[in-house]
Image (spheres, grey):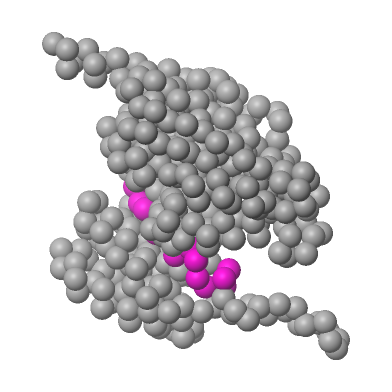
Amino acid sequence: MKLKITVLPGDGVGPEVTREAVRVLRTVAEVYGHDFSFDEQLFGGAAIARTGSPLPAPTLDACLAGDAVLLGAVGAPEFDGLAGGLRPEAGLLTLRSACGAFANLRPVVCHEATADSSPLKTEVVAGADLLIVRELLGGLYFGEPRGTSREGEPREAFNTMRYTEVEVERVARVAFEAAEGRRRKVTSVDKANVLETSRLWREVVTRVARDYPGVTLEHAYVDSCAMHLMQNPRRFDVLLTENLFGDILSDEAAVIAGSLGMLASASVGGRVDMYEPVHGSAPDIAGDGVANPLGAIASAALLLRHTARLEREAQDVEASIRAVLERGYRTADIQGLEGRCIVGTGEMGTLVAESVAELADMRHAYHAV
């Protein structure tokens, strides 16, 4: 397999966690004989500081010319005062739109070894395994008109939540197809008792569900879903929802995994797929070598699965994450029982990479017998 990956380290802890994800991908390429090339580009606040733009033209060109984008994180306090279109987050939205990746997949798994790390009771989160499918290119984040009125007092700001049937249907199909390979249940989350966009959402999802008779569909209001996600996360298999609700619910779901640093994401369905951990840039710990790289490494596993179609290698990376956690290694953000071995960003990445190599050696030895 030959693969060209555009790497956007971004801001804050982004470069630190991305470095470890690349380390693991290099190990996969080496032990399985693949040809992965990595093209690192400026993005976000780092790009603003150097070029004045959060998404310079050479960066966008490199992303669109590659097979996949691996992103760290964007955002830093020093850029918060910039106009909306010049902030790091604006570059991220523009990149998502250019890549056309409309479906954001966010797996949330409670590993047995870290079930005690969640602030929720272990018996509540143990065994939880769900997939949040978030629509990524519509809703309030992209809807027009939007802006701030500069006339009169007090000032007024406005955003528009807008969805078309096509946008809802295409992301719904991603969710139902994912459910067919899981526990065959989709929970569609909306606010249909208040919002017209949600009523359209519910109508279209219900229609799409008829094409997947083996999958059970239920509808849930977003506020009720947020409560049940904390009370009984095991009741959910695939959560399907629009952009804003998905953003909020997936961050809330980090409680189930024990830390926001554990969560990965894949943005698929367009011209180029994008992969990034769910956490932000965490500027308060940037450069300290304590950030959790497992979300970025798990994002690399999703890259292997969805873009490279290397399921065996993806499973090996995910198994290596579990193995390292089962051996008691933790980064500082993963709270839990005392007596665990706390390691830094680089050491955690090295441990996972070494485990990947060990698994590959075992596979090779098995096939040689």
Q: Nearer the viewer, residue 243 or 369?
A: 369
Rendered view: 242 above or below 104: below
| Residue 134 colored in magenta in the image | yes
Bounds of the magenta segment: 129-142
Residue at figure coordinates x 58%, y 68% from the top left: 141
Answer whether residue 148 is visible to the viewer in this image: yes
Where is residue 306? Give x, y as percent: 34, 46
Classify residue 167 by image quadrant: bottom left
Where is residue 239? Give x, y as percent: 37, 61
Is 187 displayed left or right of 278 in the figure?
A: left
Residue at figure coordinates x 33%, y 33% from the top left: 1
Residue at figure coordinates x 18%, y 15% from the top left: 366
Q: Nearer the viewer, residue 88 or 327?
A: 88
| Residue 213 colored in magenta in the image | no
Rendered view: 185 above or below 204: above
Is 250 displayed left or right of 205 in the figure?
A: right
